[in-house]
Image (cartoon, grey):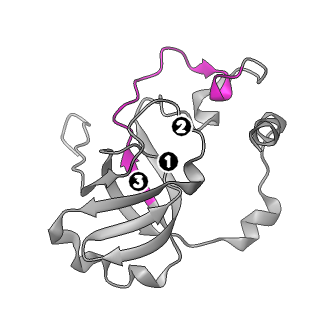
Amino acid sequence: MRDNGELILKPIGRVCNKVTGGKYGDWAEVVSRLELEPQYEEALRGLSDFSHVEVIFWINRAHAPDTPLIHPRDRQDLPLVGYFATRTPNRPNRLGLTVARLLALEGSVLVVQGLDAYDGTPVIDIKPFLPRPELSEIARIPDWLKQAREMKS
């Protein structure tokens, strides 16, 4: 961090897939290659023992929000909520975080499934996913999200 409070993030790689833009709905099936810089290859040792990874990326095609309130998924039938209550890409700091299935690790390239990032998206960090079963029983989500998920299936 600089003295003025500014953060500087340097990408460690890029997302490579066939999703180049627009609204995309079925990210669960998308297979992506995370092509990391070669100097990070050794840092990936042991990661292939995990089934899933958390990918932190910079949502480079989004913009800062114009208003703090939005309709989730741009659906007028869902209530207005603050953008921090959603997974909209339009946020003050455009960091994305997704848990993706790790299909393969080839040198400094990770092959993952389910990453909701467009081709060319900068990758900021990779972490192993550590499930917390105790949370699955007690975590709650709002009714509007349940409604949105039901409409999607």
Crowding near the residue tagged with mark 3, few <14, some 14–19, many ≥20 C-alpha atoms within 10 Å: some
Relative image position of residue 16 (x, y in whole percent)? 33, 53
Kind of residue at disc 2 = Tyr
Q: Nearer the viewer, residue 52 or 16?
A: 16
Q: CA distance from mark 1 to mark 2?
A: 9 Å
Mark 1, residue position: 116
Q: Residue furthest top?
A: 66
Which mark's residue is nearer the viewer, 3 or 1? 1
Question: In the rendered view, does 86 fall on the left or right side of 47?
Answer: right
Q: Are marks 3 and 1 in contact (CB under 8 Å)?
A: no
Residue indicated by mark 2: 24
Circle 1 or circle 2, nearest the eye: 2
* Residue at the outermost front position: 18
Reply yes or no: does residue 57 show up in magenta.
Answer: yes
The kind of residue tagged 3 is Ile
Question: What segment carries the magenta color?
Answer: 55-75
In the image, residue 131 above or below residue 24: below
| 111 relative to 136 in the view: left or right | left
For image coordinates 67% across by 22% down, the residue present is 71
Q: Which residue is mark 3?
A: 56
Q: Secondary structure at mark 1?
A: loop
Front in this rendered view, residue 26 or 143: 26
Query: Which residue occupies the foreground of this view, 123 or 152?
Result: 152
Q: Which residue is drawn at the image coordinates 40% and 36% (left, top)?
A: 94
Q: Residue at 36% of width from left, 76% of height from top? A: 105
Please tell me whether mark 3 sits on a helix, a strand or a loop: strand
Q: Are marks 3 and 2 in contact (CB under 8 Å)?
A: no
- Say above or below: 133 vs 125: below
Q: Are marks 1 and 2 in contact (CB under 8 Å)?
A: yes
